[in-house]
Image (cartoon, rainbow, N blue to C red):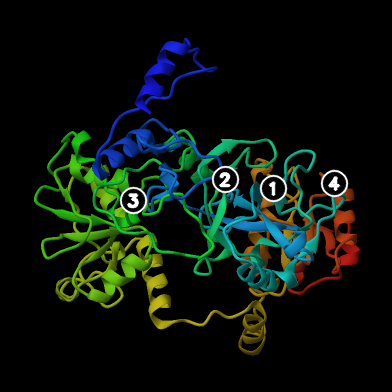
Amino acid sequence: MWFVYNSLKRVFTPVPGRIQLVESQQGENRQDVIKALNEAVDKYEEGLVIKSPLSIYQPNVRNGSGWLKIKPEYVDGLTDELDVIILGGYFGSGARGGMVSHFLCGVAAPPSSPGEKPSKFYSFCKVGSGYSINELKELCRQLHPHWRKFDINKPPSIIELPHGYKEKPDVWIEPSKSKIVQIKAAEIVPSDNYKAGQTLRFPRLEKIRDDKSWYECLDLNELERLRSIAKGKLSYQHTSTSYEPAPKKRKRVVTRVEKPLTVAKHFAAADASTVEKKSKIFEGKEFYIVNGPPECGKVQIEKNVMENGGSIVQNPGKETFCVIAHKANVRVQNIIKQATCDVVHAFWLLECLESNKLLPWLPSHMMYMSPKTKDRFALDYDANGDSYTKDLDAESLKQIFERIDEKQNVVKLTKSEIAQVESRYFPNSTLGLFRQYRFYVDRFLEIGDPQTKIPSCTLDIQASELRYYGGQLSDTFDEDVSHVIMSQRDLSRLPLIQQMSRDRPRKAHVVTETWVSECIEAGTILKERNYGP
């Protein structure tokens, strides 16, 4: 084989971008393979082809040919998975005929205000592999009641497709009724077939995230962060000589590597050799980083800790100062069950870095407290985290109330139940005047798109009044909207709103802002037909 390789060097002159001789090197053991794979990751290459010097090329022969292909996505923990939401489906054929077999998945557009649930979703990729026929049938069974036929003349306002409706699905689903799925792929590539402007190369469905709510899917900002990390490659972490065999998920999955090199994701650590010391704020402190927020992942946080004098481990022990986590995943839950280590929110560590000093823990920082730490906190704080000696600000008080709700498992009343309580115990109060209604306020240049909000819109006042008197506001003109509030000064979107209202099973009342103010003044709901635009 080396004779052939060396002969090729004399046969042609390489022309970059047209014909080139692939770089090659000799290896003798597993460590050589791991080193070469890590170098490929650093160069944003697809992977390696490993050949036995005595082998020959055999067409269509995979096992036993002496040729092996290894890609970073074959190795557990080296590739980011993406949690996207199912927006639509495509009917299959053959064994999958008569049911949805491929899915259109999307990402959320960031809401107009932090903390709000997304109201717009952009198409991002199409996936049709990674699941068995039985798994597909079960997923279709769960989604079937909510599928709606996609009508190009009446597209859903909450789902955005590119101009020309490329990759339009056969059916679509309201995101609040849908499922989040975990997708694994080789890389993120540009594409004008999807509204997100990019898509996935070789996507496959890893699992259904029943542990996540519909609004917790990947958003455009997180997608852009992932794309920029490694030029779109989703494999950018290094493997090491410590490895575990990857668990078999399905018998039908075929791998080209008989014993793939694998490493669990929580063992993929930052490279300490490239770290430059900046300060000593974490000196003498040992941390275990489970995960980090979207803007600052596990590897970056580990580097930050080492740059500031701390040390990193990949399993907590007796000397571990604390465990840092952004989300309470299975790994965090297992650590909490052991009841030996404090688990601290990642934002505490980021606050330390920002202030350039080791800050004391506060109750709001703690995801879990060991018995020793809990006893120490009991000297300064009550059971809800309220300090005995320090005054609270509004934000701290809000956090305490949220924790009280979580501890006491407070039952959330529906708007109808709240209205019944108000009617019985506060019959003369008007604070629940609009409690039973859901409003779409015409404040966006494009209906249902918060990103096109009209600056200093006169209807902002009415929106605040509606919320103050118990009304529920919606950024989209969904099927639950009972009233549309329009300004008498701007009726440019009225024809489209009227058409959308006629096409709904339940028509919405379209009224001007005068209806809101006069209802409040009268203390009752006035007849809508007298206030039409």
Q: In which quadrant of the rendered view does residue 197 lie? A: top right
Q: Secondary structure at mark 1?
A: loop
In the rendered image, the quadrant that contains the N terminus is top left
Residue at coordinates 78% horizontally, 67% vertically from top-left?
A: 482
The residue indicated by pointer 2 is 202
| Amino acid type shown at disc 2 | Phe
Q: Secondary structure at mark 2?
A: loop
How many angstroms separate mark 2 from mark 3 (CA)? 21 Å
Residue at coordinates 40% horizontally, 17% vertically from top-left?
A: 7
Task: Point out the tag, 4 or 3, that comes first from the N-terminus.
Answer: 3
- Dot in front, 2 or 3: 3
Q: Percent x, y for residue 106?
A: 63, 51
- Dot in front, 2 or 4: 2
Task: Point out the tag, 2 or 1, that comes first from the N-terminus.
Answer: 2
Is there any visible trace of residue 386 in the rendered image?
A: no
| Amino acid type shown at disc 3 | Leu
| Residues packed near mark 2 inside 10 Å, few (<14), some (14 to 19) or many (20 plus) | some
For this rendering, which residue is in front, 174 or 384?
174
How many angstroms separate mark 3 from mark 1 (CA)? 46 Å
How many angstroms separate mark 2 from mark 4 (CA)? 47 Å
- In the picture, the disc for residue 261 is 3
Is residue 189 positioned above or below 12 on the image?
Answer: below
The residue indicated by pointer 4 is 491
- Dot in front, 4 or 3: 3
